Image: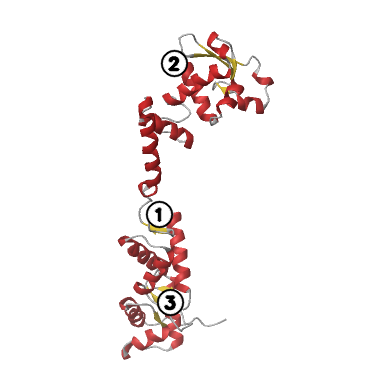
Amino acid sequence: MSTPMPSPPPDIVTAVLQVVRAASAPLTADAIQQSLSDGCSCNSKELTRILRSETASGHIGRWQPGPRSRKERFWEPEESGYIRKRVLAALTAQPFTRRALLEKMKKDAVAYAGTTLGRLVNTTVEGLVKEKKLHLLPPSGPYHSWRYSLTPADPRNYLTAVKKALDQVCRKLKKTGVTPEDVLAVLADMAGVSLSLHHPETSPAPEAILNMVLTAIPQLDPQAMRQAPIWIPDLRQYLKLPKSTFDRAILTLAEQGKVFLNRHAHPAQMTDAEKETMIPDGQGNFYVVVVMRKNSGH
């Protein structure tokens, strides 16, 4: 049975911790040993046991080797926490590309051997992005590379060309009675988003879309003005609107009393492909025919 190693005197452990915690950068075991006072000196094996014990207990941390060295170092309890703090501090002033951030870290952070700092920075940055503590900014204006920032991207920095084109469209359509709000509503539908606080599937369709549908119905079949039924899949194909936009427009017109909607008599007999071209009523049935009312205004 092996004899357990005796525990080092408490004053030696305290002295080692004081040296490590007072350091301005990570220290190798050799540097720690040289910094100990004569009254608290210990041999290499004893110091190794102390450092292993104190790192295992979390009192100090084991760090990657420094430049031109393969020896591990000891310092603050969390190396990753240190790198994390340095990254966040660097980005407080301004966003940086990954390369620029690494260059700044090389100047501001403790030195590392080889490519170790780059690996630590990359790992830290990826973790912070996943935690949403950092945000990626796509290239814009004078910036041609992706950058890391403490705040999310501002859409204004990416909409200059869109704003210019939108202003031109609004000016062209102004004399026709189409308002900027109508243009924005159509743009939102084309983009598949909603400007309303309501869910896009349940909020009313924009007026411009409704007018487009009411105009298209008699174009598809002039007899529609005399209440001839219009097959919804045919109207859908004619307008070529996104499915959600088309469905919402037809349902809104029905709610406004401008059209009638007729359901399929036997929805269970419909295939999935057929159901996709119809409009669900939310109760397991499907609207298949739209009929204009006489007072629809068109």
Q: Is residue 166 above or below residue 129?
A: above
Residue 187's x, y, as percent? 44, 35
Q: Which residue is mark 3?
A: 112
Q: Earlier in the sequence, mark 3 or mark 1?
A: 3
Q: Earlier in the sequence, mark 1 or mark 2?
A: 1
Reply above or below: 78 against 254.
below
Which label sits in the foreground, 3 or 2? 2
Q: Can residue 197 be seen at all in this image of the molecule?
A: no
Q: Which residue is mark 2?
A: 256
Q: Residues within 10 Å of mark 2 (few under 14, many from 20)?
A: few
Q: Position of residue 269 (x, y in %)?
A: 69, 20
When asked about the image quadrant of residue 121, the answer is bottom left
Disc 3, SS: loop
Q: Quadrant of residue 261?
A: top right
Q: Is residue 260 above or below residue 236?
A: above
Query: Between residues 18 and 223, which one lies in front from this camera angle?
Result: 223
Q: Is residue 109 above or below residue 130?
A: below
User: Helix, strand or loop at disc 2?
Assistant: loop
Q: Point out residue 13 in the picture as x, y percentages from the top left corner.
A: 36, 80
Type of the residue with mark 2:
Gln
Between the C-alphas of marks 3 and 1, the distance is 33 Å
Which tag is nearer the camera, tag 3 or tag 1?
1
Q: Name the residue type under label 1.
A: Ser
The disc placed on residue 140 is 1
Answer few, some or many: residues within 10 Å of disc 3's Cα (few below 14, many 20 plus, some between 14 and 19): some
Q: Residue furthest bottom?
A: 38
Position of the N terminus by quadrant: bottom right
Dot 3 or dot 2, earlier in sequence: 3
Residue 228 falls left or right of residue 63: right
The residue shown at (49%, 25%) is 248
Which is in the foreground here, disc 1 or disc 2?
Answer: 1
